[in-house]
Image (tube, coloured by chain):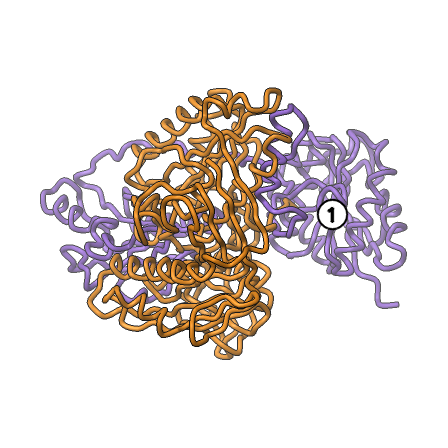
Chain colours: A purple, B orange
Amino acid sequence: MAEPFRVVHYVNQFFGQIGGEEQAHVPPASKAGAIGPAVGLEAGLGGHGQVVGTVICGDTYFTENLELAANQVLTMIAAFRPDVVVVGPAFNAGRYGVACGAVAKAVTESLGVPVVGGMYGENPGLEMYGRYGYFVKTRANAAGMRQALPEMAGLVLKLGQKQPVGAPEEENYFPRGIRVNYFAGERGSRRAVDMLVKKLRGEQFTTEYPMPVFDRVAPAPPVAAVSAAQVALVTSGGIVPKGNPDRIESSSASKYGKYDLEGMAALRADTHETAHGGYDPVYANADPNRVLPVDVMRDLEAQGRIGALHRYYYATVGNGTSVANAKKFATAIAHELQNDGVHAVILTST
Amino acid sequence: MRLEVGSIFIKDVRLGEQTVIDRGVLYVHGEELVEKLRVDDRLASVSVEVARPGESVRIVPVKDVIEPRVKVTGSGDSFPGFTGRVHTTGEGRTHVLKGMAVVTVGPVVGFQEGIIDMSGAGAEYTPFSQTVNLVLDCRVRSGLTQREHEEALRLAGLRAAVYLGEAGRSVAPDELRVFESHPLGQASDCYPGLPRVAYVYMLQSQGLLHDSYVYGVDAKSMLPTLIGPTEVMDGAIVSGNCVSACDKNTTYHHQNNPIIEELFLRHGRDLNFVGVVITNENVTLVDKERSSSYTSKLVAMLGVDGVIISEEGFGNPDTDLIMNCRKLEARGIRTVLVTDEYAGRDGASQSLADADPAADAVVTAGNANALIALPAMERVIGQLAPVEKIAGGFDGSLAPDGSVVVEIQAITGATNELGFGRLSTKGY
């Protein structure tokens, strides 16, 4: 048999056999081998995987020092060089659930190792961190351990042996919000009519795409002195120097560009164009100022109505670009603008 | 309205001395076809090639796909408003060359056209790997605007389909289906006890290479209106639209709208299919508000209990989709939405640009951002170079050996939002 894959298990002070609530303040500790539920979990791995270490932390300590504790636990877990990390199961214990979720997040982001856990549907840790691991659905309390451990072990086995994990309903874990394509048995038009018939009959139906919950961004306070402000232009309308030097994609952009406006009174058809594939480009190409209003900004600058137009503008393509990429670009661009002393930004879309 | 649709099964298409159907083979007189197309002097050259299912062929960049049909009896022509008189169509008898398609190829904007692979991994994602395709590679003379270029290609495809459809006029069809819809007054009372259902058919209307036409009218300039489902089968709706080709309805999709087919199939059994409302997806907020309000009012006037709403495209039109849904649900009319997703290559992002709790019944046609590796093909019809620029492609998409990595977004019809295919998405 091949060398067993390496599992590290994270548990709280109670399941780590340190003590009850009176020990909830203890900082993280690392122990070799399997302790508490890790023993049962390991039994379910049939010798293919081995729990090489258990990391234990008090729930209060963790939640009161969230960032620090997550880092400490991460360091201890990393030292065991795991192939799979297991957290919990936390059932409906709120602090424990949050700790398990935060460990899952840290492990996913820093180690890139898959995480398996278990929680009850209403555990706040699930909503906060559910996307960072395969969390099997458990009962509300530890009476559900007997059900949870074999299901968690099944997932650990698959992940440890690099086998594909089945759909959430097959393996009884909470969907992580990862959208995966597959070919359904019936074509979409038939599925739609079936769904409508059920909905009209008042029968149970399952939507194929549960509606997301949107971030709401509170508007920033008004700029105090616009006439003294340095104002930047940022666009998702794809205006780039002619030839698209950074090769920003016409759809699903993976990058943005930063371009110099020094000495330009306005954009022109022979200097700039759009790389955006999602709208009629004719008008933007004929006069790129329609999407990135450099001409008007120069007027405002000359009239003293703004302090200055920032020397650089930033552009990406907002066509089919994922929210995750958009957030990443925005964070990086905002950081640079702040460092450059920009006071206000005009965002143009299409 | 009663339409008989007679399908002539076409097993193969070959170039020949005359254009004729003989025992399931369509022979095409290539020169005569090209001559018919050259009435449009904007076309500089047209080359004609055949691509068959299973062949090692890549067709790119694809502008439109059209099914050849011919009006045998009844008023109107195949594409009213474009290739003949503007008479109302949708009645009488129509013959269809089933199993084949006309595919127009040629870069118009250069980053807004699609890919059809006749074999390999990509073939599973496009319905047009299953049809024998007569491919027209159209080059236009220099000095045309992109709008003129688009129109020249659009008309070439329609004219070719009409020319080929004519070969089926007197051929006995292999299959005959009858589609009948009743006048509204009677339709509502047809099947007491069954829920009354309508179809809200959203048409892309955002501008160049994002346009659709109804009886020759640009859909962006129309108010939402009623249309007979059989009119759609006769080519009343034409595509001018191929950007992010995965979820754009080609003319072929309109001619074979699977939601209309399915509603006919279930009519009298599970539901009473009362009518179809077409609406647009314009870019300004005032247009979106007007069209969605007018659509929900029209549907309410039909007195139906529920609707299916199909979107075309993504992003900006997600707003139209959600507005239509919200306003209909607010009137107590139940909705099912058909859309696709842009969840990022890792599937971890939010899929739609707009959302509402009222949209509780959604069918998804897949995540268009998912990556796919397409093997090199022995033959390329059109040009391979635009692959890196088309929506869904990126810098590095095209390997020197001709193999390609793109998002399925680039594949014609991959995530069609009429629910033409079986692709869907699950949350993992």
Callout count: 1
* Residue at left offset 32%, top offset 43%: B87
- Taking the spot 37% from the left edge, 48% from the top edge, the residue there is A334
Residue A100's quadrant in the figure? top right
Amino acid residing under circle 1: Val
Using a 10 Å C-alpha cutoff, classify the residue at mark 1 as few (fewer than 14 neighbours), some (14 to 19) or many (20 or more): many
Counting from the top left corner in percent of width and height, residue A350 is at 31, 46
Q: Height in image: A22 above or below B242?
A: above
Q: Depth check: give the residue in front, B14 or A217.
A: B14
B126 to B342, vertically: above or below: below
Task: Name the residue located 83 percent from the left edge and 58 percent from the top edge.
Answer: A49
Which quadrant of the view contains residue A94?
top right
Return the x and y of residue B368 as percentages of the image width and height: 51, 53
Observer-nearest of A163 and B83: B83
Label 1 belongs to which residue? A116
Residue B294 image position (x, y, % from top left): 36, 27
Q: State the image coordinates of residue A228 (x, y, percent, origin top left).
A: 18, 41
Question: Where on the picture, by quarter, is residue B383?
Answer: bottom left
Q: Is residue A56 visible?
A: no
Which element is circle 1 on?
strand
Q: Is residue B170 left or right of residue A159?
A: left
Foreground: A326 or B114?
A: B114
- The chain letter under disc 1 is A
